[in-house]
Amino acid sequence: MDKYLKISALVLILLGLLLRALVISHSGPSPDYQQGMNIDEVNYLELASNIADKKFFGAWSEGFFTQSTRAPGYPVLLASMSLISGKTSAMLPQILNFLLDMLNILLVFMIGRNLYGKKAALTAAVLYATLGATFIYVKFSTSEVFAVTLFLSSCYFLSTMKNFYRWSVLGFCIVFAFLIHTKPVFLLVLPFVAICIYFRLRDNHLQNKSCLNQFPSEGNSLNHGRDIAKRSDACQRQNQDPPRLRRFFASIMPHGMEGRPCDVRNLICLLDHCLRTETLFGRIIRSLVPVAIVLLFCIPWAARNYAIHKSLIPICTFSGWHLLVSAESADDLSLKNLTDYVYAPRHSDFTEGEFYRESVNVFMTSFFSHPVKFIAAGIYRFSYYWIPQKPYLRIFKPKAYIMPIYITDRIFIPVPDFEGILYVSLMIAAVAAIRLKRKFIPLALKWLAASTPFVLLIVFYAAVHIIGIPLEQYRFIIEPLFIILACGFAFAVFKENSGPEPSVWEIRYALAVPSMLLLIIAILGIGKGKSSSYEYPKATSDPGSVSYSDIRSLQWKNLGNIPEKTICETMGEVKYLVKDLSYDAKLNKAVEKKGMAVAKLYVKLHDPENPRGLGDMKLNFKDGSFPNDGGIIKVKGPVYTGEYKDIIMDVILWGKLDKETYR
């Protein structure tokens, strides 16, 4: 029976991978202008292109040249992969997402097996392989799938930390630091990670393991029953450590009290001793060491931001974030409030650093003047975005359990939705409590003992979003871990299984993930960036037309809006052109229209006087006439704005510019 169940599970996982491939094939290359995330996609792609070609981190986004709005992790990954492949592929982000999601399925299985056993792990892997949200994000050029990989890798190293502390800490620090530079909200979670690590290290039945498993090779031989004498000697040395520790403190305390420096070698020995012992003090030190190392890894990017903005921006920032984190109703969460704030006339000369400083001041004032009201607003936002609305009604509706995934324009395949998994988990807990009665609480506590670090990790991550912005895609990052915990709970109360200890070879294979992250960073330092320049002809506008710079001036005078019937004439490089689409400003996305095309124009990009260009806008081409992607053109047409105050032009005239001076 188990054999057939395993085969069925593997078939479902393979079907999940096949469905991902079909979804990617149907959606086509990035960006997907028909989805609301197209602005994020274009910005990530442009950042990656600039990193790979010009060796600077910055890109135009809806009229602003942003250098710190995006975290660097995902653009660095895309840039490195494009350098490795040797050419830029329009499908590279989707192919990369597919490969990362394959790794995610494996990581879900490995974490589940370490904690709860193979059956729970295989069930969790099947649920993640067929989870509806994964098919949504796998087709986008955004950081969600990569963030899941980093988060699950961090959870895996956390699960092995009690057996192979040093190797696990090495992998955890690299991966979690990259996770912070991909999703900066984890910087707020980092201080609480020490608590998660502490609970992972305090298992009673592993109190004496630290003296055996400091090095994987030694721990491996001992775990297989070899070298019993070495096991006895190691534990005996550990039991003899406390008196030696007291003598050590007695020897250094006078120096510290007299103000003379302590011997560095003694301090190193003390730290090494704390890392090896299973005392309360030792566990606290071992819990804090990874947090301190990750903080050190965050210093270079914070220093870079300070050098640019003269403000301490740890990872990234965007204008007006304090308006969203102080929202008290659905109306307060509107884009209009945000864009009106950004385009206030007094902000016309603001830099990202100045926006950040003002936001911090307003945020701190709001928090300390009305803390209860501020937290209540955060809880409202959290429930608005993350908790299903009216669950007492939706729990009885099929659409809460099934999500349709389209593989063609008309054919879809139903897959599990996370909301349904949440409801089923609650049902299983209720059934178990009724059926097992008195046995339920001991079994639930046994599950909680093994799951405490990971339950706390979810709780801390959710809690920081009360003072953050709990968008739905941020919840997706922790959904795989919830699935693992839910499957572990179901098998714990009905099967009473426990996970085996990881082997030395498994931890070595897992270290391939942080090794690849280090390789990604190293690749960016190899080779020279591409430099291009183009001598644009002198700008001459027809009567009644205005330039791009004039358009931007009009926006600052009208809260980001552009007067009706405004005609603009400008020139630049066309990028990210997609045919048979037309961008609809009211919908904030493109709709299908045969014979038309959508593209981005980067105004006067590569101009010798302004190598980074003057700005960007969206273009709607019609009548089946449009340039090639990457062409240098001159365009003319009426302009208007979308919801994000992004400039959109309906092109009525366009022409290629002479490329002889383009090099």
Image: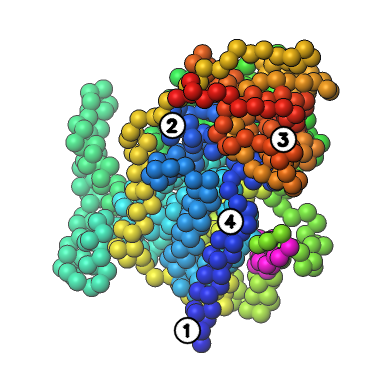
User: For the residues carrying marks 1 and 2, which lies nearer the camera in this image?
Assistant: 2
Q: Check disc 1 and report the residue beneath it.
A: 3
Mark 4 to mark 2: distance in Å?
Answer: 27 Å
Q: Check disc 4 and report the residue beneath it.
A: 24
Of residues 365 and 148, the one drawn nearer to the viewer in this rendering: 148
Q: Range of the magenta residues?
A: 410-426
Mark 1 to mark 2: distance in Å?
Answer: 52 Å
Q: Check disc 3 and report the residue beneath it.
A: 620
Relative to 337, is 428 on the left or the right? left
Vertical side of 319 occupied by 334: above or below: below
Label 4 SS: helix
What amino acid is at disc 2?
A: Asp
Q: Earlier in the sequence, mark 4 or mark 1?
A: 1
Q: Earlier in the sequence, mark 1 or mark 3?
A: 1
Q: Check disc 2 and report the residue beneath it.
A: 53
- Does residue 415 belong to the magenta stretch? yes
Relative to 176, is 582 on the left or the right? right
Q: Earlier in the sequence, mark 3 or mark 4?
A: 4
Residue at 56% x, 17% y: name it.
Answer: 536
Label 1 SS: helix
Crowding at dot 3, Cα within 10 Å, few <14 / some 14-19 / many 20+, comes out as many
Label 3 SS: strand
Label 2 SS: helix
- Marks 4 & 1, CB-CB < 8 Å contact: no
Crowding at dot 2, Cα within 10 Å, few <14 / some 14-19 / many 20+, comes out as some
What amino acid is at disc 3?
A: Asn
